[in-house]
Image (cartoon, rainbow, N blue to C red):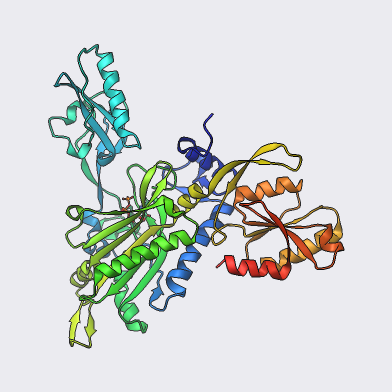
Amino acid sequence: MPSPAEPANLMEALVALAKRRGFIYPSSEIYGGLNGFFDYGPLGAELKRNIRDCWWRDMVQRRDDIVGLESSIIMHPKVWEASGHVAGFTDPLVDCKVSKQRYRADQLFWSPVVVDSKTVGYVSALESEKTAEDLQAAAELFKRKKAITGTLAPVTPRDFTEAKESEIPLIPSPATGEPGSLTAPRAFNMMFQTNVGAMTDASSVAYLRPETAQGMFVDFKNVTDTTRVKLPFGIAQIGKSFRNEITPRNYIFRSREFEQMEMEYFIHEDADWAKCHEEWITWCENWLKSIGLPASHLSRYAHPKEKLAFYSKGTVDIMFKYPFGVQELWGIAARGNYDLTQHATASGKPQDLFDEASKKKFVPHVIEPAVGVDRILLAVLCAGYDVEDVKDEKGNVEQRTVLRFSPRIAPVKVAVLPLLKNKEPLTNRARALHARLQRRYAVQYDDGGAIGKRYRRQDEAGTPWCVTIDFDTIEKPGDTFTLRERDSMQQRRITETELFALLEEQVY
Ligand code: ATP
């Protein structure tokens, strides 16, 4: 039997654990859920909050050159015209007229079936880790079903945006397996529309923001006029974004409502943007490691020059090895001064600064690290998940499931466990410790069941430490507890002062 930690089963096991332990639920589940939307349960809400808080502390509070912002989710519609989102924030959409399924053309792959150098038909498959294998298997099946003899050539996977007009009617729909029902790709704008005010006509149309970044550009002058920031400086924001993704998938990786943490770092037009870009990429990698993501799962992807937007100087994505493939986690883009220039033109309000040295006005350039909180949360769940064989007190082998979260982001930092539920000296001491810890940290008091069971419960929640208040605590001098460490399962005695010192050092 494959172990649950193997990639094919890892997502299934994680989704089940996340539901069972209250990390993540499907949104509106009692009504059948809503595709692309999720709720975070008690442990998930803490985990997400910790990711946000760590980022905010490191990105904003612990730096002298970055300030925070919270802009509104619905902004003036002209913002999205100037930014290019109204015209260009689109994905290529393909409809299957028979099944009514919709696909992103760049995620729908196809190939001709070539036998003895002759095209005898077409096959299609949705993008996955093994798209080419799926197409090859489909081609073999096609040949067998049609009883075609001869040598089958290897498939040549291409996405649907590359299909010629004459090929489109010949490519089978992945839903029905039959050709003739797929439409040509058309641009689908991913912004959610709403109306502001009582009128629902064209004049009241507004959008839920598809990114938080525009808030920083639109408030650029407000920030420079009301604070003492000097170049280079950044404006950072954490908040919800909304994209009507055609195919939300891979759990919380691609959803329709998600949260972003973005920062616009403004630099002089003559500054060495490439150096600054590189510094931010490194900063982001180090930050991900600081919250416990292993370096072995991180890589970089530099967007090829020919695929960049005309204003872009360069974009590097930090990729994470998810169980469903290596995917973008954090994009770090050098955007020139495109955004501020666009808003200056559209609003008629200059977005420039005065350069004391040259006595000239200029529009600053920007480096933009943009990351999704939900994608980080999924990464820490995937990287932290482990199932291992351990021996219980009697020497019997059992399996334990553990989430090896960094103490920085673990939803619960310490579980306080009185050895027995009904021995007042033990529970009194445990309650007192719990109350003191609770003033600063998210902690849990657990007195239900055998101590081994309680440890397992905390392992699954990713709690780095358990402290057990036992008879030695109350009977022997020193007022020490048993500290049990989640990953090593080692136990040692510790005083309250030492426990607080440990937390101070590890939870920052
Ligand atoms: P993708 O290519 O995966 O659609 P993107 O390049 O469009 O992502 P950006 O516009 O650069 O993404 O957004 C910045 C970050 O926001 C991404 O790196 C990702 O972490 C997060 N993000 C973007 N879209 C989603 C989504 N639908 N669900 C969850 N997170 C998202």
The structure residue drawn at horizontal position 32% and vertical position 71%, both measured from the top left corner, is 265
Quarter occupied by the N terminus: top right
The front one of 318 and 166 is 318
Q: Position of residue 427 (x, y in %)?
A: 81, 59
- Residue depicted at 20% across the width and 17% down the height: 151
Which corner quadrant of the image does residue 494 belong to? bottom right
Does residue 340 sit above or below 36 in this rendering? below
Q: Quadrant of residue 206?
A: bottom left
Q: Number of callouts in the render?
A: 0
In the picture provided, is 14 more to the left or to the right than 276?
Answer: right
Tell me if residue 215 can be seen: no
* Residue at screen point 71% across, 71% down: 497
Residue 153: horizontal and vertical position, in percent? 20, 24
Q: Looking at the picture, how far across and down is residue 90, in whole percent?
A: 25, 50
Looking at the image, residue 126 lies above or below residue 409? above
Give the image location of residue 453, x and y in percent. Answer: 71, 45
Image quadrant where one finds the C terminus: bottom right
The image quarter containing residue 81 is bottom left
Residue 267 appearing in the image: yes
